[in-house]
Amino acid sequence: MPKRYNCEIDDELLLLWSEQFVQVVLEIAKCKKWPLDKIYLSRKALAGAFLEATKDCDMTQLRRPGEPITRAQLAGILTFRLARFAPIAIGKKLNEDQHALNINIYAAIAFSCKTILSIDASHLPPSASRDLIHFLSRRNVNQETLGLVFEMVSHYT
């Protein structure tokens, strides 16, 4: 993917992103040894997250005429929308697992790192990952702030 992005998000790209998001969720579940039959994905919520991200990209682009947004800004937008739309639900067996309760945030971060930034999220510093998860789940954060975070991440990885 080019360093800067022109916000041309078409149906083909959305389908590709949806498939890649599912792969990321499966990788997380496998790593955590969670039963796949207790993880549910709402395709409607996933499509909604990507649709809102498309609108956010367009608005970001309007604020910067003639200057394409960076991959890090796109990663911030996608992470924010995927975390907020929470397309993943978990079954009762996983409700006691703190990590499973944050699966939407883990998946949003991992997806953006892998798909947009070509970074393996497991290589992020543990303290930074914990803070990012905490801010996304418990504090106010927006797409622009996440874009700056991802700018720094991509610069130092």
Image (cartoon, rainbow, N blue to C red):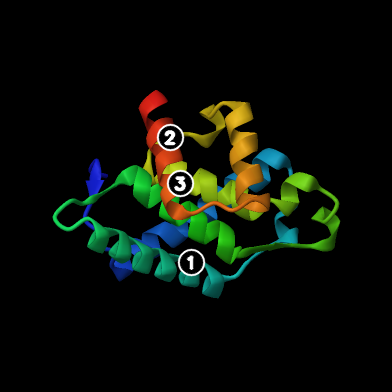
Q: Helix, strand or loop at disc 1?
A: helix
Q: Is residue 92 above or below residue 75?
A: below
Mark 3 or mark 1, earlier in chain? 1
Q: Give how far across and how far down residue 156 sits, in percent.
A: 40, 24
What residue is rendered at 31% in x and 59% in y?
Answer: 60
Q: Give how far across and how far down residue 120 sits, in percent.
A: 48, 34
Q: Which residue is mark 2?
A: 119
Q: Which residue is mark 3?
A: 145
- Of the residues tagged 3 and 1, which is closer to the observer? 3
Is residue 157 among what the camera can see?
A: no
- Of the residues tagged 1 and 2, which is closer to the observer? 1
- Three-letter code, disc 3: Thr
- Whether label 3 touches label 2, CB < 8 Å: no
Mark 1 or mark 2, earlier in chain? 1
C-alpha gap between disc 3 and disc 1: 18 Å
Mark 3 or mark 2, earlier in chain? 2
Q: Which mark is residue 49?
A: 1
> Quadrant where the N terminus lies?
top left
C-alpha gap between disc 1 and disc 2: 21 Å
Q: Nearer the viewer, residue 106 or 20?
A: 106
Is residue 104 among what the camera can see?
A: yes
